[in-house]
Image (cartoon, rainbow, N blue to C red):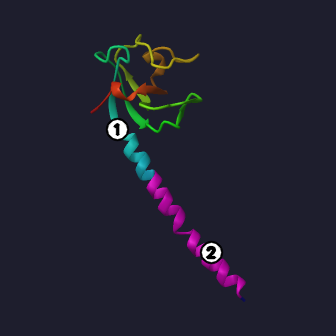
Amino acid sequence: NSSPPQYETASAEKRPLPPSSLSHSTTSTSKSAKKKCIMLDYKNGRERVAEGRVCASNPSDTVHHMPLGPNASKVCVEVSKIGDAAVWRPNSEIQTIADAVGSIVAWPSDKIMFV
């Protein structure tokens, strides 16, 4: 008789936890997804090379299997302003901003303006 009450208690305890943690992570993701930004040329910081959205800035996150590292952000590139501008960390598929549209790239945090 003691087994069913323990089972009910365990399942009752488990039910509230997932929605709570899902709700929290969804909130964090929503906030991150709304951080619209202008990406400035990483070389001189003057020219607006693209528009995008900052997804994360946790140094342990990875972009194309490389750790983001300190003072960097993970940005989803949405609009190219200067298509032939170089990306900060090129790879075999993405060398320019034009290549990066629709993709996620690492970008120096000090070369991002939030709008």
Provide the residue designation for mark 2: 10
Q: Quadrant of the N terminus?
A: bottom right
Q: Nearer the viewer, residue 55 or 111?
A: 111
Does 13 lie within the magenta span?
yes
| Helix, strand or loop for the magenta stretch, by majority | helix
Answer above or below: position of 97 versus 30: above
Left or right of 6 on screen, residue 77: left
> How far across and how far down the image is residue 13, in percent?
57, 73
Tell me which segment is drawn in magenta. Answer: 2-25
Report the amino acid beneath label 1.
Lys
Left or right of 47 on screen, residue 16: right
Answer above or below: position of 1 versus 55: below
Can you tell which quarter of the image residue 98 is in? top left
Query: Which residue does the image show at 44% across and 56% down from the upper left?
Result: 24
Left or right of 15 on screen, residue 57: left
Provide the residue designation for mark 1: 35
Report the amino acid beneath label 2.
Ala
Query: Which residue does the image show at 47% across and 21% down from the upper left?
Result: 100
Secondary structure under the numbered disc 2 in the rendered image: helix
Earlier in the chain: of badge 2 and badge 1, it is 2
> How far across and how far down the image is residue 106, in percent?
47, 27
Query: Which residue does the image show at 49% across and 31% down from the upper left?
Result: 69
Left or right of 5 on screen, residue 75: left
> How far across and how far down the image is residue 104, in percent?
48, 29
Secondary structure under the numbered disc 1 in the rendered image: loop
Distance of mark 2 from mark 1, alpha carbons?
A: 39 Å
